[in-house]
Amino acid sequence: MLVRIRGAWFVAVGVVVAVVATALLLVTRAGADTDRCTRFRDAADDRAGLVTGVGADLLVIGDSYSVGLGVGAAESWPTRLPGRVRVGGFSGSGFSRGASPCGDVSYAARAARDLPESEIVVVEGGLNDFDQPAAAVEDGFERLLARLDDRRVLVVGPAPAPERAAAVPAVDALLADLAREHGVGYLSMAEADLPYLDDGLHLTVEGHRQFGDLVAGALSTARQPGR
């Protein structure tokens, strides 16, 4: 009886230890996500404060590429675009609500909160939608276009970053189909040969230059939804 009681007690202790360890891990992860989201929000605010160029207003909505994560805002690809360029970027975000762990920072949600006047809107992304259901991406795409119905739109698809290259063709094809269905411009980056940082995900300074120049060359294809 004594051995059995001790055995039962040790099993109970093992369960308690496992539960506590799991709870600590979840708290640690939550704290890490909170810190990361705070950094992302600060970077988004900093990037929004940097307006470059002169001429017609142009708005970029995008992810970490538009913010310039890894190289700095002043080196980010939107600085290569003509016109007076503003950027509404948020690292880790995408078309779908579930792309980011930082709440609903999807493109449509951010456009609904703060959409400055601009003749052309460049929407860059998809790389963070790599693991999201197609229906979620489609829903986000349509919600965004509902906010942009009187503007010319160019959607720029995901670059084939080595870390997510396997998922890029499917996301690229989905976004191309949605752009065609809704009558807006689309620029595929799926075949772009760009240099990346050591993380295999973000662009180098030269990568941003090349990316921005490709987008600048495609601005003439921007169209109003349904036109």
Image (spheres, grey):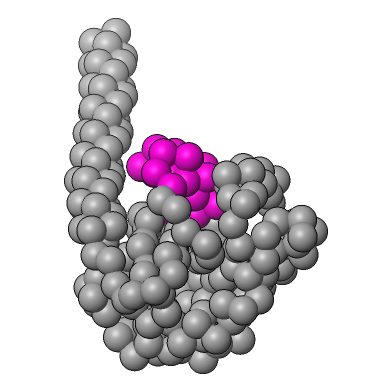
- Residue sticking out furthest to the front: 55
Q: Is residue 187 above or below residue 223?
A: below
**Residue 110 is covered by the magenta coloring:** yes
Q: Residue 3: x, y in percent?
A: 26, 16
Q: Quadrant of residue 153?
A: bottom right
Q: Quadrant of the N terminus?
A: top left
Please name whichever residue, 173 or 132, is drawn nearer the observer in this view of the structure. 173
**Which residues, given as a range, are shown in magenta?**
93-115
In the displayed structure image, the side of residue 223 where residue 86 appears, left or right: left
Q: Residue 21: x, y in percent?
A: 24, 34
Residue at (27% x, 11% y) in the render: 5
Residue at (20% x, 51% y) in the render: 42
Q: Quadrant of residue 17?
A: top left
- Residue sticking out furthest to the top: 1
Q: Residue 176: x, y in percent?
A: 71, 67
Residue 87 shows up from this direction: yes
